Image (tube, helix red, strand yellow):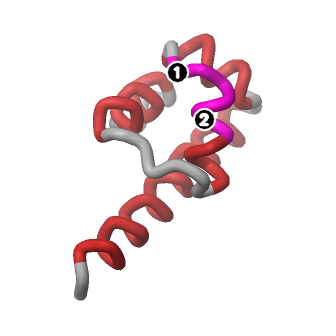
Amino acid sequence: MTNKIVHNQLQIKLVKQIVKGMEDREWGQGDLSRHSGVPQPTISHLVTGKRAGSLATWNRLLQALEVA
C-alpha cells in the first residue's frame, strides 16, 4: 500500500471517530471548537476531507472528545 492510501484510510477513521464523538455528545462543530481550541472552519475542512490536518490538530480534537 502506498503512503497516500494509508494516510487516507487513517483520515477516514479519524473523521469517523470525531463525528461519532460529536454525535454521542450532541455537539456541533462550534462546541468541538470551544472544547478543543481548534477553529470551527478547520474542523469543517478536516471532516469534509478538504484538509489533511496535523497530528497535533487531530490529537486536540480527540482529546476534547475524550477519545484519545
Counting from the top left corner in percent of width and height, residue 23 is at 71, 41
Give the spatial CA distance, label 2 vs label 1.
7 Å
Label 1 element class:
loop
- The answer to whether one can see residue 20 in this image is no
Kindly indicate the quadrant of the structure image that contains residue 39. top right
Q: Is residue 54 left or right of residue 20?
A: left
- The region drawn magenta spans 38-44
Label 2 element class:
helix
Counting from the top left corner in percent of width and height, residue 17 is at 51, 50
In the rendered image, which quarter contains the C terminus? top left
Specify the principal SS of the magenta part.
helix
Q: Are marks 2 and 1 in contact (CB under 8 Å)?
A: yes
Q: Is residue 56 left or right of residue 67?
A: left
Say the numbered circle drawn on residue 38: 1
Counting from the top left corner in percent of width and height, residue 20 is at 61, 48
Kindly indicate the quadrant of the structure image that contains residue 1. bottom left
Magenta-span inclusion, residue 66: no
Residue at 42% x, 69% y is 8
Q: Nearer the viewer, residue 29 or 17?
A: 29
Crowdedness of circle 1 by 10 Å Cα count: few (<14), some, many (20+)? some
Q: Earlier in the sequence, mark 2 or mark 1?
A: 1
Amino acid on which disc 1 is placed: Val
- The answer to whether one can see residue 59 in this image is yes
Amino acid on which disc 2 is placed: Ile
Crowdedness of circle 2 by 10 Å Cα count: few (<14), some, many (20+)? many
Magenta-span inclusion, residue 40: yes
Residue at 46% x, 30% y is 61
Q: Where is mark 2, residue-wise? A: 43
- Placement of 13 over or under 4, stated as above or below: above
Q: Nearer the viewer, residue 50 or 7?
A: 50
